[in-house]
Structures are given as C-alpha cells and as structure tokens.
Image (spheres, grey):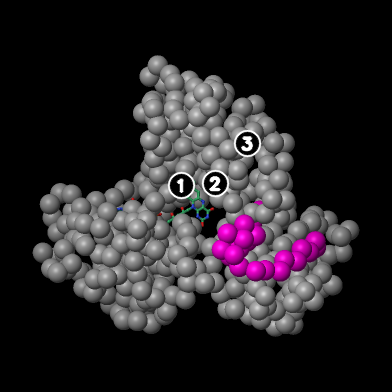
Amino acid sequence: MKKFDVIIVGGGPAGFNAAKTIRTLYPERRVLLINDKENFQIPCSIPYVVSGRIPAEKNVYPLSKVKDLGVELLISKVTSINPSELQVFLENGSSYRYERLILATGWIPNTLMVENSHLDGIYYITTETGYVQKLVDEVKSAKRIVLIGAGFISLGFADQISKGYPDKEITIIEASDHIASGIFSESFEREIEKELKSQNVRIVKDTRVVGFEGNGRVRRVVFEDGEKMEADLVFVFIGFKPNSKLAVDAGLSISERGEIIVDEFLRTSEDNILAAGNCVLHRSAIDGEPVPGMFASISARDGRIAGLNVAGPEVRDSGIVPAGVTEAGRKYFGFSGYTEKVLKRKEIEFVVSEIDTTDAYPGAIEGCKLLKIKLYFSKSGKVLGGEIIGSSKYVFPLVDFISRLIADKLDISQIVALETVAFPPITPPPLLQPIQMAALAARKEL
Ligand SMILES: Cc1cc2nc3c(=O)[nH]c(=O)nc-3n(C[C@H](O)[C@H](O)[C@H](O)COP(=O)(O)OP(=O)(O)OC[C@H]3O[C@@H](n4cnc5c(N)ncnc54)[C@H](O)[C@@H]3O)c2cc1C
C-alpha cells in the first residue's frame, strides 16, 4: 500500500493552500491531494459566468497546478477513513496510508424539502463546469427567474444576471424580514435593495415557499399564503452546510451543526488528523463563540494554518473575523466582524460612528468616488465590526483593515493615532482618513 507523509482530502482553497504551504516549507515531504472532481469552477466567480461576463472555460479552478508544487494529485472520492490504521479508502476499493491527514472537504448546499422540489428548472449551486454551463444556457432562455433566499450568493446572482440580461424579470423570495443574512444595518440594506431595484430585481421578504407547480418542469412557485408566482427558472440558495460525512463516519468530534471540531492548531479529536475550511467549526476572534465561516478567504487561511501545523503545533488560530464584500448595482457593500443586528442580538453594548469620505483627493480628481463607513466599538474601546458602501474598489482594503483592527484588539486611541498611506489618485485624503476619523468620533462618546 502506498504511503504518504501527508494526504489532503479536498482541493478547494483550504486543501490547495495546505498543499502549497507544506511543499514550500517541507519540500522533502510526500504529499497526496485527493479531490473527487477535476473540471470544476472557481465558486466565487460563478455569478459572473452565469451572467455571461466570463466564459465557463475561463473560470475553471486551477486544481492541476498543485502538481507544479510537487504534489501528487488523484481524482477520486474518498469513501472512508480508518484513523487507527492511518488509512484512507477510495471508491474503487484502493487505499493509501498517511502520517498526517488533512480534511478539507468543504461545503454542500442546503436543500429545500417542499412539494415538487424535484421538478426540472429548479437548481442548487454546485461547481462542476458542465452543470454551471447548463445554468448559463438556462439563464439565457428564461424570462422569469426566481431566486429563493436573499443571502450573499443570491444577491450576487441577481445582481450579475440583471446586469448581463436587463430584460429578465428577477425576483428574490426571502422567508425572513432581512436580506444578506442580516449582516448589514437597515440603511445599508435599503441601499442594496434600491440598487437592485434599479436593475429590475424585486425582493419579496417575509414570504415562505411551500412548493412548486409544473408538469415535469417548474412553472410556478407556491407560497405559504396560497399565492403563486410564475417562474421559468428557479435557483435555491438557502445556505450551505459542512461536508463532514467522512469525519462523522470516522468517529471524529462533530458539532451539533455537523462541523468538525478542531483545537487552536486545527487538530481534530483524532491524533494525526487536521481539518480546515468550510467543513470545520469556526470561532469568532471577538468573543470565542461559534460563528459562520463559509468564505474562501477563511478556507485559504485555514489551509495555510493546517500546513504550518502539519509537522507539529507552530501557529495558533486565534479565531476568525467573518468579513465579505458583495456588489449590488453600482456599489460594493463590505462588512467585517459583528455589525448592528448581530451586536443587538448578542446584547453587546456598542458605540457606532459614521464617516463619509472619498477614495481619492481632491474631489475634483478624475474617478474620485464616495465611501460611507460605519464602525462599531465596544464600550471598552475595541473595534467590533464595520460596514462600508461605495462604488469604489477601495471598499476591500478597508474591510481587511477593519478585520485586522478587530483581530489585533487595538485600542480606540491607538486607532486614532494610526498612520495610513496617502496618495491622491488612490487613497482617501489625509484630512479624512476614515477609520481614524470614525475612531475619533466614537472616542468622544466613550
Ligand atoms: C456562488 C458562490 C460564490 C461565492 N463567493 C464567495 C466570495 O466572493 N468570497 C468568499 O470568500 N467566498 C465565496 N464563496 C464561498 C467559497 O467558495 C467557499 O467558502 C470555499 O470554496 C470553501 O473552500 P474549501 O476549501 O473549504 O471547500 P471547497 O471549495 O468546497 O472544496 C472542497 C473540495 O473537496 C472535495 N471533496 C469533498 N469530499 C470529498 C471526498 N470524500 N473525496 C474527495 N474529494 C472530496 C470537493 O469536491 C471540493 O472540490 C462563494 C461560494 C459560492 C457557491
């Protein structure tokens, strides 16, 4: 039986980054990466493919690049693990032995268990290129598109499809009274809705789907109150769950929600097995509580942490700061950490400050765009979270900047005293550096 120093199951951002880190630091180690499919799409950019902005063949996930790192790549499904024998078994019956195993098996979409949910024309998200190409063709030919769920994925799809095809009638149905998983404050939610509405996307909240109608193919969506809506094509985007079956079957410790439980070095309950990415239970860097971490950004860092720790504890995971960016209409919407609704739900007292600035200076400079920032501070003067709107790409470094302040637990006065680079065409003006100014305004309230 072939033996490897490290076997990685799953080649998404977590598995890939683990492989890269191990081969960079320990080039003498033999690493085998096993993934159950070869030709699949980069998930984050699937909305851009479905809307016709990028051809599917230009969005193929570069899995084979692990071979350039000296990693052995095997396309097969791992069907079970035997932790006591340090073995993995494949669907064709063969098996491999490992010294260290890294589980990076990712996510699977939640399914909607309602009447007639098997009808043609009802789609979930998976990443196989053939499947995504089918979605491209379906979107092209549909007139009325219904998306169920108003989370980040759904908003991203609606935004891109309505940009690519302004003539489609697009409706998002959301069971709760908020969008984007309640991450943004009311005023930001309204901005997202306004932007999408300007692109012909309707959002219907407080409405539950109980079934579908159609003869073989979906024709109508049925709601709890008996109302119906015509639909040629339906996307179901009601969240993701961890793909942890291998770990469950192997007897590893698992959370109530099915996530693999890991310690601060990403070690599972079994010696020699680490886990990384969407399949693990993440904890917040703010209060240590379990927190959703289904982001490529977090999987990528998990992979690197697992890679660093594969030869023994080296780097401690001090928790994650969930953060993301979405696009609606002409604007980007970013968040980091705990924002208003989350803080209220957790009954954490906070001070919020709001700052308007620009992504260049002076305002007359070509391409200068407005940015609005909300920053949330604890009563003890630590950043808890932030929200940003702007039609500027500068939203993303601000999100990352806020995440660092949260993770490093910088004090409010230290934040006021921070320097950040200034350069007219690409940064906010030195007189309105947004994070420092928001901290200054909040400092007065504490
Ligand atoms: C439409 C869409 C848009 C998104 N946009 C963003 C975004 O803008 N930003 C962001 O940060 N995140 C985004 N995400 C989330 C992001 O894609 C995921 O968080 C990320 O892919 C998770 O990485 P992972 O490595 O943990 O798992 P995955 O990417 O799920 O990789 C796991 C791999 O393991 C394989 N596997 C599973 N079980 C087995 C087995 N038994 N044997 C062999 N192989 C197996 C799977 O096939 C898969 O290839 C988006 C997701 C979707 C669907």
Vertical comparison of 312 with 184: above or below = below
**Is 64 placed left or right of 403 in the picture?**
left
**Quarter where residue 378 is shown:** bottom right
Which residue type does callout 2 highlight? Answer: Gly
Label 2 CA crowd tier, 10 Å (few <14, some 14–19, many 20+): some
**Is 9 placed left or right of 384 in the picture?**
left
Label 1 CA crowd tier, 10 Å (few <14, some 14–19, many 20+): some
Q: Residue at x 42, y 49 (%)?
A: 240
Looking at the rendering, the stretch of residues picked out in magenta corresponds to: 333-358
Q: Can I make out residue 83 in this image?
A: yes
In space, the residues marked 1 and 2 are separated at their CA atoms by 8 Å
Q: Secondary structure at mark 3?
A: strand
Which residue type does callout 1 highlight? Answer: Gly
Vertical comparison of 277 with 44: above or below = below
Q: Residue at x 55, y 50 (%)?
A: 181
The image's mark for residue 317 is: none
Q: Secondary structure at mark 1?
A: loop
Which residue type does callout 3 highlight? Answer: Ile
Q: Residue at x 53, y 63 (%)?
A: 322
**Quarter where residue 112 is shown:** top left
Say whether disc 2 or disc 3 marks the residue closer to the N-terminus.
Answer: 2
Say whether disc 3 or disc 1 marks the residue closer to the N-terminus.
Answer: 3
Q: Is residue 356 magenta?
A: yes
The residue labelled by disc 2 is 151
Say whether disc 1 or disc 2 marks the residue closer to the N-terminus.
Answer: 2
**Is 1 placed left or right of 227 in the picture?**
left
The image's mark for residue 203 is: 3
The residue labelled by disc 1 is 239
